[in-house]
Image (spheres, helix red, strand yellow):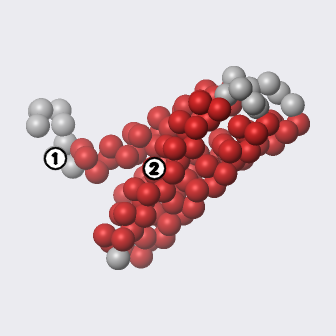
Amino acid sequence: MTNNQSPNKHRFDLEERTTEFARRVIRMCKSLPRNPINDRLVGQVTGSSGSIGANYREANDALGKKDFISRLKIARREAKETGHWLILLNEANPGKEKEFRVLVDESDEFRKILSAILQKTG
């Protein structure tokens, strides 16, 4: 461990990862053409993708176990919802399947990670 590294740093790696994911979603959305379908879907996916990390961060500052579990469940639902909106955006924007697939896979990975944390917390 380096001098500037917290002993609990691993606990917050997912905070950084979820923030970077939301940033990647935003960058992808900014590259899409503006139209009524994309505008609606972009609003949904940027909200849910950002909410994954926001709720995970809230869980890390939870007031108790019940609050922690509740926040993690919300983050997990947001990860699942994000995958849904990304699939629909992919449908509305053919030709970007590879880029969308990477993001869908990452949202699914968050869902699995959060499920595993919830199982361990039990």
Judged from this view, the residue extending furthest toward the right is 36
**Residue 106 falls left or right of residue 39:** left
Residue visible at 71% across and 37% down in the picture: 90
Residue appearing at x 33%, y 71% in the figure: 121
- Label 1 secondary element: loop
Disc 1 vs disc 2: which is toward the camera? Answer: 2
* Left or right: 75, with 36 as reference point: left
Which image quadrant: the N terminus?
Answer: top left
Image location (x, y in percent) of residue 119: 36, 71
Mark 1 crowdedness (10 Å alpha carbons): few <14, some 14-19, many ≥20? few
Locate the C terminus and report the quarter of the image it occupies. Answer: bottom left
Residue located beneath label 1 in the image: 7
Q: Which residue is mark 2?
A: 109
Amino acid marked by disc 1 = Pro
Q: Residue at x 50, y 66 (%)?
A: 73
The percent position of residue 102, horizontal first and vertical second, equals: 53, 36
Q: Is residue 111 above or below residue 9?
A: below
Sequence-wise, the earlier of marks 1 and 2 is: 1
Q: Please state which of residues 89 and 24 is positioned toward the viewer in this rendering.
A: 89
